[in-house]
Image: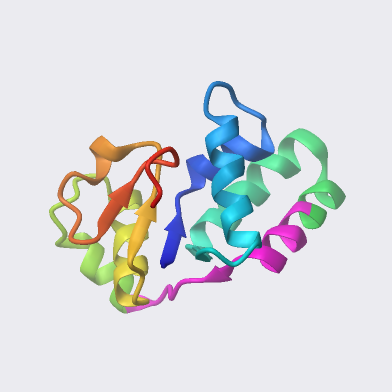
Amino acid sequence: MKICVDTNVILDVLLAREPWFPAAVNVLSEIETGKHEGYLCPTTLTTIAYLIQKAKGANKAKHLLAHLLSIFDLTELNKNVFSSALSHAIPDYEDAVLHESARLSGMDAIITRNLRDFRRASLLVYSPEEIP
């Protein structure tokens, strides 16, 4: 299954946020072992870079980004994604951009901890605990 992993799941792993850490690690493990094809929206990388650089410095941020890029592919992010997100039923623009980037890139599902934010998604949406 081709899955787009939301930023919050990646941050749960990087920051070892409990109680979500074990399920988020499981998602990454299933991607690393080839059970699922893992994708990130490019905005996830820029968000993570900003947060990690602020907290741990530029070298640590680059190291973590390189590791993520060795595990994940990226979804498309272009003008069509941003335009489509403007008219999407998902009210939060950032979530709508992630959804449209995933949809237009042919993803089967989105993995997020914020299921409520994706109630109006046209893709399947799972929490890390529910991933098939």
Does 67 sit above or below residue 77?
above
Left of 115 or right of it: where is 120? left
Asked where in the image residue 91 lies, by quadrant, the reply is top left
Left or right relative to 22: residue 96: left
Seen in the picture, residue 48 relative to 67 is either above or below; the reply is: above
Residue drawn at the location 16% of the way across and 59% of the way down? 88
**Res 128 quadrant in image:** top left
Question: 43 and 108: which one is in front?
Answer: 108
Q: Does the magenta portion include 14?
A: no
Residue name at image x 15 percent, y 50 percent: 120
- Residue at image location 50% in from the left, 64% down from the top: 36
Residue 121 on image: x %, y %: 20, 54
- Location of the N terminus by quadrant is bottom left
Residue lying furthest top: 19
Front residue of 57/73: it is 73
**Visual colour scheme:** rainbow
Q: Is residue 49 above or below residue 85?
A: above
Asked whether the viewer can see residue 4, the reply is yes
Of 119 and 82, which appears nearest the observer?
A: 119
Number of dots carrying numbers: 0
Give the extent of the magenta segment.
64-79
Residue 114: give x, y in percent of width and height: 34, 37
Q: Position of residue 31 (x, y in %)?
A: 58, 60
Residue 87 vertical placement versus 64 (above, below): below
Could you tell me if residue 10 is visible in this image? no
User: Residue 75 location, x and y as percent?
Assistant: 46, 72
